[in-house]
Amino acid sequence: MLLDKLCREVCELHQELPRNNLVAWTSGNISSRDPESGLVVIKPSGVMYPDLTPDKMVVLDLDGKIMKGKLKPSSDTATHLYIYRQRPDVNGIVHTHSPFATAFAAVGKPIPPVLTAICDEFGGKIPLGRFAPIGDEAIGIEVVRSIGTSPAILMQNHGVFTVGKSAKAAVKTAVMVEDAARTVYYAMQLGELIPIPEEMVARLHKRYTDKYGQ
């Protein structure tokens, strides 16, 4: 994919984060890896979402060398690049502090597969990763260690990371994480959660991945 096109796509996808109430002020970020060149496009650090433009996106190689862009990349860049280096199947990463999902992270609880939508999208619980400090590869290391086959993970005391074959797929997953977290939180106020049997979780996920959509 041409990098200019990828910069436009990543810039446009960032607007989905505030539109879906997944971020506040300048928090959160999206990156996308160009499968042809291996270069990564990521949000610049501390820029308001309405002020983002394609030319403000930062392009880096997998070692963190800036190839294009005049602004500093996201403070989560080391996390994104580590995940890309370890997961060749991943070409899109999203990080948010969406409120309901981050509330689960704050109390150190994964989100259990108690809704068919969770089974469909995640194939099981939305896992929890251990606390890791911001700024270096520590978060990326824990994401890779703990995410398993899920496309999403809650990082304890921090927020949400999602991965996908594309940045758009990772954004969709971030929206679905918050939707699931909100519904499960409300359900917990009403009573005890009803678990879905493991074999049914697997069956629902297979049906969704194999048959849903066009």
Image (cartoon, rainbow, N blue to C red):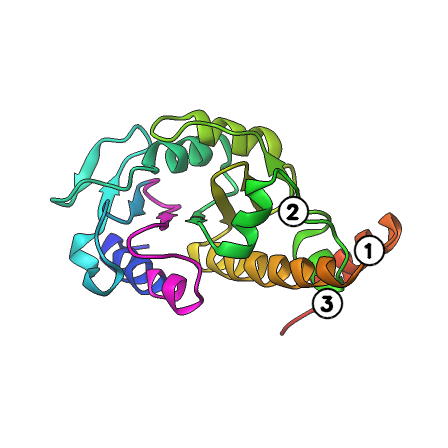
Mark 1: amino acid = Glu
Dot 2 surroundings within 10 Å: few (below 14), some, or many (20 or more)? many
Q: Earlier in the sequence, mark 3 or mark 2?
A: 2
Tell me where residue 84 sits by quadrant.
top left
| Residue at 22% in and 51% down | 57
Q: Nearer the viewer, residue 151 or 108?
A: 108
Name the residue carrying label 2: 126
Q: Residue 192, which numbered label?
A: 1
- Name the element at disc 2: loop
Tell me where residue 121 sits by quadrant.
bottom right
Q: Nearer the viewer, mark 3 or mark 2?
A: 2
Q: Residue 211, which numbered label?
A: 3
| Residue at 49% in and 37% down | 88
Mark 3: amino acid = Lys
User: Left or right of 169: which side holds 69?
Assistant: left
Q: Which residues are magenta?
A: 14-38
Image location (x, y in percent) of residue 188? 73, 57
Residue 35 against residue 187 in the figure, above or below: above
| Residue at 44% in and 25% down | 138
Residue 3 against residue 19 in the figure, above or below: above
Q: Earlier in the sequence, mark 2 or mark 1?
A: 2
Image location (x, y in percent) of residue 147? 60, 37
Q: Nearer the viewer, residue 109 or 44?
A: 109
- Name the element at disc 3: helix
